[in-house]
Image: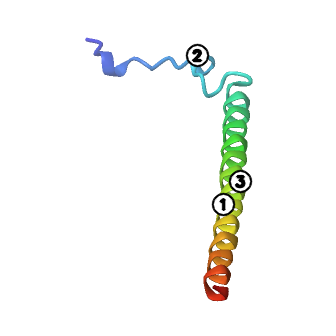
């Protein structure tokens, strides 16, 4: 009496997407591109926020200077 448990399992490693040629490289390149885009976006927001803060501080100091001279 042969049971299904006594039969050896047949594994086909080439059917796995993680072992196929280039799949891991494509995922790594895609992740790198996404991270680079996110860094550029965050850098742009940071520069814009710095510029806006500087502009607000100049306007505030100018309004204080004008109110003190009046």
Of residues 68 and 20, the one nearer the viewer is 68
Q: Would you identify the image quadrant in which residue 31 lies?
A: top right
Regarding mark 2 in the picture, which secondary structure is present there?
A: helix
The image shows residue 34, relative to residue 49, as above or below, that is above
Name the residue carrying label 2.
15
Tag 1–tag 3 contact (CB < 8 Å)? no
Residue 7 in picture, x, y percent from top left: 39, 17
Q: Which mark is residue 43?
A: 3
The image shows residue 6, relative to residue 33, as above or below, that is above
Q: Label 1: few (<14), some or many (≥20) within 10 Å?
A: few
Q: Label 3: few (<14), some or many (≥20) within 10 Å?
A: few
Q: Would you identify the image quadrant in which residue 52 lies?
A: bottom right
Residue 18 in picture, x, y percent from top left: 61, 28
Regarding mark 1 in the picture, which secondary structure is present there?
A: helix
Q: Residue at x 67, y 58 (%)?
A: 46
Q: CA distance from mark 1 to mark 2?
A: 54 Å
The image shows residue 2, relative to residue 63, as above or below, that is above
Q: CA distance from mark 1 to mark 3?
A: 14 Å
Q: Nearer the viewer, mark 1 or mark 3?
A: 1
Regarding mark 3 in the picture, which secondary structure is present there?
A: helix
Name the residue carrying label 1.
52
Q: Label 2: few (<14), some or many (≥20) within 10 Å?
A: few
User: Which comes before the other along the chain, label 1 or label 2?
Assistant: 2
């Amino acid at each position: 009496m042969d049971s299904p448990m006594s039969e050896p399992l047949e594994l086909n490693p080439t059917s796995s997407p993680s072992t196929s040629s280039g799949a891991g490289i494509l995922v790594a390149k895609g992740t790198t591109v996404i991270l680079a885009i996110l860094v550029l976006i965050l850098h742009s927001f940071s520069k814009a926020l710095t510029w806006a803060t500087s502009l607000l501080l100049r306007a505030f100091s100018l309004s204080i200077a004008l109110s003190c001279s009046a």
